[in-house]
Image: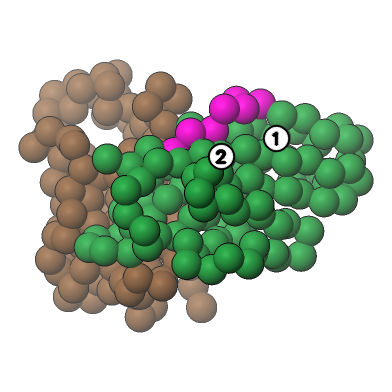
Chain colours: A brown, B green
Amino acid sequence: KAGVTQTPRYLIKTRGQQVTLSCSPISGHRSVSWYQQTPGQGLQFLFEYFSETQRNKGNFPGRFSGRQFSNSRSEMNVSTLELGDSALYLCASSLGGRNSPLHFGNGTRLTVT
Amino acid sequence: AQTVTQSQPEMSVQEAETVTLSCTYDTSESDYYLFWYKQPPSRQMILVIRQEAYKQQNATENRFSVNFQKAAKSFSLKISDSQLGDAAMYFCALLLTQGAQKLVFGQGTRLTINP
């Protein structure tokens, strides 16, 4: 079974631009969640989608948004990029139940210049 | 609010020896899961071991075992017979069973294995 796939692996953007990151979950998984990892703040929860509905959202500004498609693939969008948005963005998928472990992808490294 | 604290930013151990990584957490919930994840330079977060809070028995996965002290809110990871491939960042994480799947991570411990 293929794992969680995140594309692209690396991105370089300029301040003020917007970016879209993609995540394809493990087949059959209906929950996709996103995390931001930075050296200073560590790993922080962005949001989680289950069956195309956002179930929870972390403490991030409205510039961070996401969506999930009917095939469970998810995209995360960041508008008006700031230098502080430079980070590793990790996606995780699971079956979505309380006993379902999260499986992570390799992440997208975003650099904002 | 839930918090997870890893007080050891870095640890090192000789190959084949045993090392213990510490983790404490705080939550007012009684039902939750605890995890240890490993993040090697490849960046992928790999699940090492998990513990259900309602289970008193400590989880074990081959060379990896935990010491779960629910009253003390402590969840340490013991790695026996350390191998070079164990070198990585290790993160302790808490997951509540109610609502969305949202992991709360500790700051991580960088583990170095000395040959």
Q: Which residue lies at the image location 54% right of the left edge and 33% below the top edge?
A: B6
Quadrant position of the C terminus of chain B in the picture: top right
Q: Can residue B37 be seen in the rendering of this structure?
A: no
Residue A97 in which image quadrant: bottom left
Q: Is A3 on the left or on the right of B114, as rendered? A: left
Q: Is residue B82 left or right of residue A45?
A: right
Position above or below: A78 against A15: below
Query: What residue sits 8% from the left and 37% below the top?
Result: A62
Residue at horizontal 18 percent and vertical 73 percent from the top:
A51
| Residue located farthest toward the left when viewing the structure as drawn | A62
Three-letter code for the amino acid on which mark 1 is drawn: Leu
Circle 2: residue type = Cys
Q: Position of residue B12 (x, y in %)?
A: 77, 30
Q: Secondary structure at mark 1?
A: strand
Mark 2 Cα shell of 10 Å, populated few (<14), some (14-19), many (≥20): many
**Image: magenta residue range:** B4-10
Residue of label 2: B23
